[in-house]
Image (cartoon, rainbow, N blue to C red):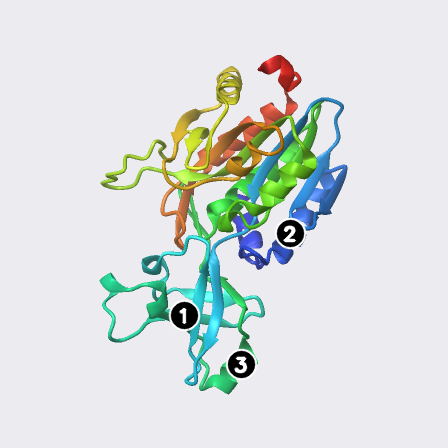
Amino acid sequence: MDYLSVIEMLNGSHGPAGDERQIAATLKRLAEPYADECWLDTMGNLIVHKKGTGPKVMFAAHMDCIGLIVTHIHKDGYLSFGKLGGVRPESILHTPFRFKNGVCGVVSLRRKVAPKDMTIDDLYLDIGAKNEAHARRLVQIGDTAVFRMPAFASESRLVSPYLDDRIACAVMLDAISHIRAHTSDLYFVFTVQEELGLRGSKTAAFAIDPDYAVALDVTAAEELDDKKQASTILGGGAAIKVMDSSVICHLEMVKLLETLAMESKIPCQKEVMLSGGTDAGAIHVSREGVLTGGISIPCRYIHTPTETVDLSDVSAAVRLLTVFAQKNLETTKDVM
């Protein structure tokens, strides 16, 4: 798969948390040739089904992203905004954004505020409007905006906004196209509103009622002079989740994923993420509980316009997802 082209296609589709219709349509078009059926549920999750006679397995990658939402239009044409998800002021200052209708603007800081003291309330969007009336012809209260930044490849690295979690969406698409013989009943769910609190995965898991689940997301990779000592590195392989702030993965799932990786000679590493949650957090407590694990892609600079992953880790994640999907799984009663 040409991951750069796929990421550019996905990022070209509007998809901030709460307004994922465009990106869902793009993903549906890409996944349909390899599915028995595809549908959107009431929340807006895209569910891609490859039928099987064995246990139900749910894979989840969120297609929503962080963004901005207009809260006020000033008399001079500037826009105040709120944040959709984990937007940090220092990561968006002087950064261009794009609205769903194509209008673009740049985030700026009020003159009397020092950057070290700024909050979201000190920032505004400049869309080039001359006054309030002009601005209202371009955007409305409640309109949403996303990063307008390019994706590019540098050696084995891919740099782009919204690799959280579009790169995991690409991993699922790639795996779906490669899965052949399988007995498990496979559900690939591109979830909504993960950035607002794992909302889409909660309802999807309740409806599907899976026996097993694997959440796919990015995880923090080690950066220069990293005092937090991240548990994963770029180029170290697919990250098998042990825990994040929303879940402690079932030990049976951690062991199974490790065993599959070892048997298939897939590079892997363990992941412990102390801050930040994933769809695994909502899925594992659905109904009576779901055996849940996670496959993560190490990523630098999460929630900035320049998120960075290594393509070797992406390929490893595709391979691990594929072998898990093709494994003849026992019923969960036999596993426990």
Going by the image, does 55 lie left or right of 240?
right
Q: Is residue 183 left or right of residue 109?
A: right
- Residue extending farthest front: 288
Mark 3, other Cα within 10 Å: few <14 / some 14–19 / many ≥20? some
The residue singled out by tag 3 in the image is 136
Q: Mark 3 belongs to which amino acid?
A: Arg
Quadrant location, the N terminus:
top right
Percent position of residue 273, x then y: 38, 35
Q: Which of the pair 143/179 is nearer the observer? A: 143
Secondary structure, mark 3, is: helix
Disc with the residue nearer the chain's start (1 vs 3):
1
Residue shown at the point (45%, 86%) measured from the top left? 131
Real-space Cα distance between discs 1 and 3? 17 Å
Residue mark closest to the camera, 2 vs 3: 3
Which callout, 2 or 3, points at the residue further toward the start of the chain?
A: 2
Q: Amino acid at mark 2?
A: Ala
Instruction: Compute the Cα span from label 2 to label 1.
Output: 26 Å
Q: Callout 1: helix, strand or loop? A: strand
Percent x, y of residue 28: 68, 48
As helix, strand or loop, the secondary structure at mark 2 comes to helix
Lower position in the chain sequence, tag 2 or tag 1: 2
**Residue identifier under label 1:** 106
Which is in the foreground here, disc 1 or disc 3?
Answer: 3
Amino acid identity at mark 1: Val
Say whether residue 331 is left or right of residue 94.
Answer: right
Figure check: 259 above or below 285: above
Q: Residue at x 44, y 68 (%)?
A: 81
Using the image, determine if residue 213 lies above or below residue 307: above
Residue 62 in sight: yes
Q: Which residue is mark 2?
A: 24
